[in-house]
Amino acid sequence: MPPITDALPDVPRELRFFPVDNPQPEHLSPQQIQQFNDVGYVFPLDVYTPDEAAANRTYFDRLMAGATAAGWDAYSINGWQLRCSGMYDMIVEPRILDYVQDLIGADLICWGAHFFCKMAGDERQVSFHQDASYWPLTPSKTITVWLAIDDADVENGAMTVVPRSHLHGQIAFENSDAAEKNVLGQTVLDPDHYGDTPVPFVMRAGQISLHTDLLLHGSQANLSDRRRCGLTMRFVPPDVRAHKGWNRNAITCRGGDTSGHWPQNPRPAEGDDIPVKA
């Protein structure tokens, strides 16, 4: 996946929330479906057992060590899902796909994934923003799964969302000032103006959250002595179109795409093929 940029993509896009219409979900409850429509998210959802969560953490520790040795920083493991078999396997985990399927249907495409890792003492923050604002995809139907690799809480910089902000379409933003120490490049001012009181996603390792791509969210610096890592996975139904080559590294997780827009990329070879840093 190409790197995230600050400016709005120069492609025509339909940016609005598409409510879920699923009166008989199989894994989420009808109340959770309604919550997703009303506030833009559902959390926490149990996926991995404690032993499995510990194995995920061990895998990421090894991957991060290799990435660091190759010159990458803690936020750089982005779009490596066709290089890293462990990352791929988390994306196609059936217990995760079951939840996503209740929101967007039986045909599931993951177009990107990114480990957001805040090391202990990291002073950088993620200013409030909308994911869809960055992406050359249309229409805005991406569901983000945030898988907790470490326990996440307020002290170590848990992701925080503004409920109901997803109902405003594209929200105006400013390019971030260097003084913000923003990991990304967009800042929505006065986020509380666009919804209810912000809610931190406090989760145990192995749990996930689900949120729509128009939900305002951000996170504070991690001034604790504990790391906070999560894997974001971006899922769409196959009617979404990606411009600028953003469909190239997609994984067809369930079902398929009869149009051929989304390629059927295979699982990478066992291990991690860490790219050379330019």
Image: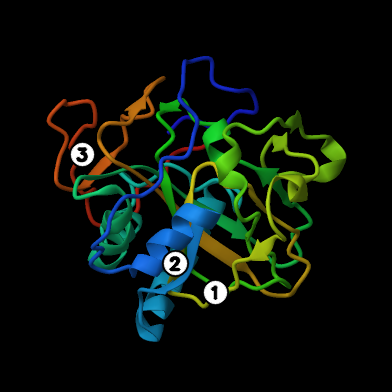
- What whole-number distance in Å separates the C-alpha atoms at marks 2 and 3? 25 Å
Alpha-carbon span between mark 3 and mark 1: 31 Å
Q: Give x and y (percent) for residue 40.
A: 51, 53
Mark 3 or mark 1: which is in front? 1
- Amino acid type at circle 3 is Asn
Q: With respect to residue 146, does 46 lie above or below?
A: below
Say what amino acid the circle numbered 2 marks: Ile
**According to the image, label 1 marks what residue?**
203
Vertical side of 93 occupied by 54: above or below? below
Which residue is identified by label 3? 265
Residue 46 figure quarter = bottom left
- Answer whether labels 1 and 2 touch (C-beta < 8 Å): yes
Dots 3, 1 in contact, CB < 8 A:
no
Disc 3: CA contacts within 10 A as few (<14), some (14-19) or many (>=20): few
Q: Which circle marks residue 208 in the picture?
A: 2
Q: Earlier in the sequence, mark 2 or mark 3?
A: 2
Q: Position of residue 55 (x, y in %)?
A: 38, 76
